[in-house]
Image: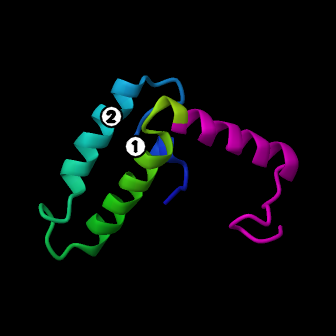
């Protein structure tokens, strides 16, 4: 599974706060552990959905995430960085 919160939530980078929230709620309901008891895959997916929403759920958090992503790409030159992925 990808680490991109936009793809995890099924939204584009141009989505509004309302669109992101709507997608988050739909997916959270679908994969919630109470609706999928004993399903480890659904629980992992739910955790990824929660984490993604924390990263891009508000305009401020989305701006911060996007800025950090741009900086990471700019300074890594397309290679993996020491932050979370090791040296590439």
Magenta segment range?
61-88
* Observer-nearest of 40 and 54: 54
Residue at 44% in and 48% down: 54
Q: Is residue 61 above or below residue 88?
A: above
- Alpha carbons under labels 1 and 2: distance apart: 9 Å
Residue 77 seen anywhere in this rendered image of the structure: no
Residue 59: image location, x then y, percent: 50, 29
- Report the residue marked by disc 2: 21
Residue 23: image location, x then y, percent: 31, 36
60 relative position to 11: left or right: right
72 relative position to 59: left or right: right
| Nearest to viewer (mark 1 / mark 2) | 2
- Determine the image quadrant of residue 85: bottom right
Residue 46 seen anywhere in this rendered image of the structure: yes
Q: Is residue 77 above or below residue 13?
A: below
- Report the residue marked by disc 1: 9
SS for callout 2: helix
- Determine the image quadrant of residue 81: bottom right
Q: Is residue 65 above or below residue 3?
A: above
Structural crowding at the residue carrying mark 2, measured as other residues with C-alpha within 10 Å and reported as few (<14), some (14–19) or many (≥20)? some
- Extreme residue toward the front, this view: 60
């Amino acid at each position: 599974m990808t680490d991109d919160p936009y793809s995890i939530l099924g939204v584009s980078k141009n989505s509004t706060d309302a669109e992101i929230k709507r997608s988050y709620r739909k997916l959270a309901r679908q994969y919630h552990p109470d609706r999928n008891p004993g399903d480890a895959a659904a629980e992992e997916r739910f955790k990824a959905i929660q984490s993604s929403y924390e990263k891009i759920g508000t305009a401020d958090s989305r701006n911060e995430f996007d800025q950090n992503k741009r900086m990471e790409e700019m300074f890594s030159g397309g290679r993996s960085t020491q932050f979370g992925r090791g040296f590439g």
